[in-house]
Image (cartoon, coloured by chain):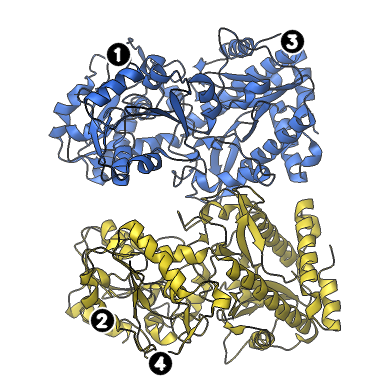
Chain colours: A yellow, B blue
Amino acid sequence: MDIKTIQKNLKTQKLSGRLFMFGNLFIDEDILPEENQIRELTGFTGSYALLFITPSKAYLFVDGRYELQAKKEINTRRIDIVKLSEISLSAWLKANFAKSAATIAYNPWNISQNTLAGLQATLPKVNFIPEEKPEMQLSAKPVKTFTHQKKFTGKTSKEKLTEVAAHLKKCGLDAFLVTSAAAASWLLNLRSNALPYSPVLRAYVLVEKSGSYKIFAEHTDIPTALPFAKLAEILPHYAKLGADFSTMPAIISAFAEKINNTPDIISCLKAAKNATELKGIRNAHLRDGVALAKFLYWLSKNHKGKTETDITDKLLDFRKKELNFYSESFAPIAGSGTNAAVVHYHADEKKPATLKKNSVLLLDTGGQYYDGTTDITRTIAIGTPTPEMIEKNTLVLKAHIALATAVFPPRTSGNELDLIARQPLLKQGLDYGHGTGHGVGFFSDVHEGPARISINAKNSAPLAAGMVTSIEPGYYKENAFGIRIENLYAVKPLKSTELLHFEVLTPVPLDKRLIDKYLLTADELNWLNRYHRQVFLSLKKYLTRQELEWLREACAPL
Amino acid sequence: MDIKTIQKNLKTQKLSGRLFMFGNLFIDEDILPEENQIRELTGFTGSYALLFITPSKAYLFVDGRYELQAKKEINTRRIDIVKLSEISLSAWLKANFAKSAATIAYNPWNISQNTLAGLQATLPKVNFIPEEKPEMQLSAKPVKTFTHQKKFTGKTSKEKLTEVAAHLKKCGLDAFLVTSAAAASWLLNLRSNALPYSPVLRAYVLVEKSGSYKIFAEHTDIPTALPFAKLAEILPHYAKLGADFSTMPAIISAFAEKINNTPDIISCLKAAKNATELKGIRNAHLRDGVALAKFLYWLSKNHKGKTETDITDKLLDFRKKELNFYSESFAPIAGSGTNAAVVHYHADEKKPATLKKNSVLLLDTGGQYYDGTTDITRTIAIGTPTPEMIEKNTLVLKAHIALATAVFPPRTSGNELDLIARQPLLKQGLDYGHGTGHGVGFFSDVHEGPARISINAKNSAPLAAGMVTSIEPGYYKENAFGIRIENLYAVKPLKSTELLHFEVLTPVPLDKRLIDKYLLTADELNWLNRYHRQVFLSLKKYLTRQELEWLREACAPL
């Protein structure tokens, strides 16, 4: 299928447009390249976009992370880029179709019921019609599954099902349909090899109030798994059925008309990690820190002539040597020189760029360990950085510290914290075009809600004790350089109060060559020196003599 | 009417409870003492509370400002205090009545349609019934009205009506019913003597898409004003009628069944002050600052033996001498010693307390000028303050500066800024039980939406250029002392960017005897010294030689 064919069909069927949401029947979760219809149609390789095709035009909607990348990847003579930082999809559709009795087609498997209802409410005159034979867009590649052991999860699947069943009884529901792959994987303590960077099993689970369940999945080795199409038969049997409309494909409403929109309790249960999970997460971060320290020492000796992919390959080698390592947690980002200004840059694997001298390398990578998921960004000087790079990196560090040291009451949403991080940059008239933090799963998706720290995620779920989040402010100067400083943090109570604060999980030195200590307040400098002392004490036993010498210097107080 | 009679009636009528919202048919606006049914029933004199009476008990709901005051004022053996900081009214009702088929009576004139619908949605099994002959609870005192002149407002009422009419056409409405007294007053450039501290005219205005209008008001000198009961006859004539359900009494829904919930455009138009209004506001603050400076000089020489009411009377005398002064903008608060820990303390007029030595005086007052409304809190050392008072006042100052210097993007809500102010206190495990700021009207209500800066006001209206807000963090130690530092600020664009920041309006020195400069960062100390220099330059021409000497010392750099 290509855009021209789609446009021809639109004309034949007298349709005003066709909306393409990103992904497949697992709304807003990771997908395989062969499942990426927007990539197939436009060439855009980023991890999120929307596409709208009219009989005469095509529009690709991208967020702040991808504005530069989209420009490079797509044919801008044929496809217009719409910036989601400036206008939302619904506002854009409203501006273009509010007054006409337009008919817009969509795939009911890959739009959530909430998103569809929102579009219909915004555009009451527009007729939104589902495609006739919609595809789930699920790869047919065979999937192997495996159990996530209790020594890692801390709870058996049966215990988790019992908790959920009790909650269903409390809500007066006969059953709840779990449509989030991460939630289904957590609930059943199952994982799979379906995706390269996330170990989730892509399944739906129908949990009954008795605690028994049915699993829906395709192309897996689970003998009891039912095909998704069976939902149309099974769901009508339940009088009081719930599902979370933010992750439930709109097509499910056609299967079970009386389904109730019920917030996904499983996503909240899993977001607040239990004591076993938190212990594992701290250990996994320690091992990941060891891999990073060994890598950073190696890089300090060997960066000359290396390419961006040499770098990420080498870091993967170090991670592979660590206990419980399973895979990377996302496609590694190593952006050198001007490439670092592309927020979610991916190196060209065929022609990777050589590290640029007298610039900075932005390195955003992570690991999946059976006992935890990591995600870290370090910005590293290669040669002699410019004074501007040092100034901007120091501002980003101030932003990072401002939020890392924040204290906040219960029921605080991420959008109520985001501007604390941005102040040091905003006061200079600077900003970054992405959120400040995202929730992180447990041997699961590296971006995992419900909590987010973003001024644009109004009313997102409150941060609660046991949640893990990234803090990752940045600064990007187009065609020049890019900076980001990212650690993961666990949310925890402040002493014996009901107040919350952040416990740092990531133990990896920050590049002091990029820090101007005279721009830091006394409190900020103390934070940095205390952090480095903690990093040194955590990692020192796991390094060779030479690596240790490097670490001692890297962690020495400023 | 008393609580016992109400309880007897509840039993006769087999009702589970009677809900009393605060106020009259002007939802959430100021009321006169004789209109305050909750005060009549309980003795509580604060500016906000809710009351719920069951056949056997009574519950007074108060927010963080009034927890201490309520304890002092009501008979706690007969009435339980419920803290709104811990549980909302709807959560409390849910906890007590969710499972029963309870019947709860309410007055449909003094609950908004939104609040009622929210309670009904939370408690689907409860039967909420309006009282049979509900009272508007509007005082019968004759009201004199007067025109707010164009030299102050910058726009004629006709120009404002034309703007609103154009908006109605755009929304496809035939008419809009303005149910906010502040909005009605702004729209018609009318004011009145109905209330002691707010000059608003308590009227509803029905604006038609032609720009013509009808005014509803009682006991006024406006010959064309219609009684409110006429709404029942007039509203059904309009096919497409709008009103803002957040300020529209629920009874209006019974008058006009097909009324649409339309956000009150007038509240937004009036919140962003025009150039004439802003010029007036700056001038009014300058004159108010002169009155405060003269008063503070006088206080420095004369505090011995003075009572809390002597203080506020004297300050009023100074304000009265200033051009365009009309009245105080709220009941002045002068809290000395332990009284200052009561956030919204009011001195006992019959037995006012004498200023306590070696403590702090919290002085929260404001003025209504024809060209602007002011609101300022200063905490002033009387004698020698304790080191703890100095430390806590400095923390509150840090909190004030943190928000006063904040920069934020468009569409930022107040709840997304609140925690910036609280950080210096929360990091010490301290907090204050009230919002950080409130919108301020223009020769109108001193607390005026739609914007607020409060972590509890989730999703409040975004701050926009031209709005005026207070910044007023505090710290209150029960039975010891209280501190608050409040200035008003105008929201304005940062240079030529789309970013916003705060322009300080209030030019009055902060008491340096209560500031420990060694707890301030270099940036904070610079802010303080720059602020004091600006205060000195603004006020110096308007003072006597002795006052000027005092000011020079008060504003000298630390």
Task: Determine the residue positioned at 63% across, 14% down.
Answer: B308
Location of residue B297 by image quarter = top right
User: Which residue corresponds to mark 1?
Assistant: B220
| Amino acid found under the numbered disc labelled 3 | Lys
SS category of the residue bearing label 2: helix
Co-location on one chain, circles 3 and 4? no
- Numbered badge on residue A229: 2
Could you tell me how far apart the alpha carbons at marks 3 and 2 are, in whole angstroms? 85 Å
Please state the chain letter of the residue tagged with numbered disc 1 in the rendered image: B
Q: Residues within 10 Å of mark 4 (few under 14, many from 20)?
A: few
Q: Which residue in the structure is indicated by mark 3?
A: B304
Residue at image point 54% right, 37% down: B435
Q: Nearer the viewer, mark 3 or mark 1?
A: 3
Q: Nearer the viewer, residue A414 or B152?
A: A414
Give SS at disc 1. loop
Residue behind mark 4: A142
